Image (spheres, rainbow, N blue to C red):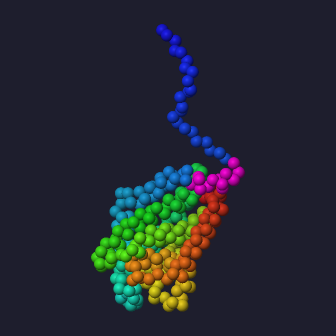
Amino acid sequence: MMDAKPTNGPAPARSNATRTLVIEPGRSERHYWRDVWAFRELFTILAWRDVSVRYRQTVVGIAWALLRPLLTTLIFTVVFSRVAKLPSPGSAPYPVMVFAGMLPWFLFSSILTEASTSLVMNSDLIRRVYFPRIIVPAAAAVVALVDFSINFVLLAALMLWFGVVPSWHILLLPVFIVLAVMASLGPALLLTSLNVKYRDVRFIIPFIVQFGVYVSPVGFSSTVVPLRWRFLYSLNPVVGVIDGFRWCILGQKSPIYLPGLFLSLVLVAVFLWLGLHYFRRTEKTFADVI
C-alpha cells in the first residue's frame, strides 16, 4: 500500500462564501441605500408574495380589478356628464376622459392604502430580522402597479372603442406614472410610520382616499375650475398628475396647466422628502414599538 503524499499547492477554495455582519455606530446611516440594494431579493420576495396573495386562486381579485374602474367610469359619466352637465375638454369622449383620470388616482390611492399599513401587517418580520424597513412599503406598492397595468389595458380598449388615437404625448406617459408613484409614496411613508405608534391612523386613510376623489379632477376636467382659482386648486398635488396623465392620453384635447404642474412637482418633492425624512428618523424604533 502506498502512502498518500501531501501536496504543496494552495488549499482548494471553499464553495460556500460567508457574509459578515458588521455592527458599529452610524454604519446603518452611512450605508443605508447600499443595504437597500443588498436586500433587493427580499424586496422581490415580499412583492411577489403580496401579488400572489392578491391574485392566486381567486376570481374576485381579478374581477374587481376589472370591474372597479369600469363601474366608476359609468357612475362618474352619468353623474358629471348627464346630470351635472360638465363639459369634456375639446372633443374627447367623456368616458375616456374619466378613465384617463381614474388611472393615476387609483394608482395613487392604492399605493397610499397598501403601503401605509404594510409595516403593521409585517410586524413579525420586522421584530425578528434586520433590514432597511423602507423595503416593506416599497414592495407593497407593487400590487398597485399590477392593478394599474390591468387597468391600462382597459383604457386602451376603451380608446379603441371610441376611436381615440393618441398623439406623441403618449411617449411622456412613463414620466407621469413615476410622478404618481412618488406623489403617493411620500404620504404613505409618513402614514405608515405614524401607524406603527398610533394604530388609529389606519382609520384616517379611507377618509383621505374618499375625500380626495371628490377634490381631485377624477370625474371631471380641471378646466371647469375658473382660471383665477386654478393655481390654488393645484395645491392638491394629484391635480397636476391627473392633468398630465390626461394630456399624455388625449393630447391637446386636454391641455395642461403649466403653473399648476410646476406647483404639483414642487409639492410632490416636498411631501416625498417629509415622508422619507420622518420614516428614516423613526425607523430605529419600529421593532420596539410594533
Q: For the stretch drawn in magenta, what is the main secondary structure?
A: helix
Tell whether 223 sits left or right of 159: right
Is 70 left or right of 39, judged from the image as shown? left
Splitting the image into 4 quarters, where does residue 156 fall? bottom left
60 over 32 or under it: above or below: below
At a point 40% along the width and 86% down the height, the residue shown is 89
Q: Is residue 134 visible?
A: yes
- Taking the view exactly as shown, the residue that stands out farthest to the top is 1
Q: In this view of the protein, which residue sits in the foreground, 243 or 118?
A: 243
Q: Residue at x 63, y 53 (%)?
A: 31
Residue visible at 35% across and 73% down in the picture: 155
Q: Is residue 60 visible?
A: no
Report x, y in % for residue 256: 47, 81
Q: Taking 198 as reference, is 249 above or below it?
A: below
Q: Front-most of 41 and 189?
A: 41
Residue at the farthest front position: 168
> If the image is split into quadrants, where does the C terminus sit?
bottom right
Which quadrant would residue 273 be assigned to in this image? bottom right
Q: Is residue 153 magenta?
A: no
Residue 218 at x, y percent in the picture: 44, 79
Q: Is residue 199 above or below residue 45?
A: below
Q: Which residues are magenta?
A: 24-36
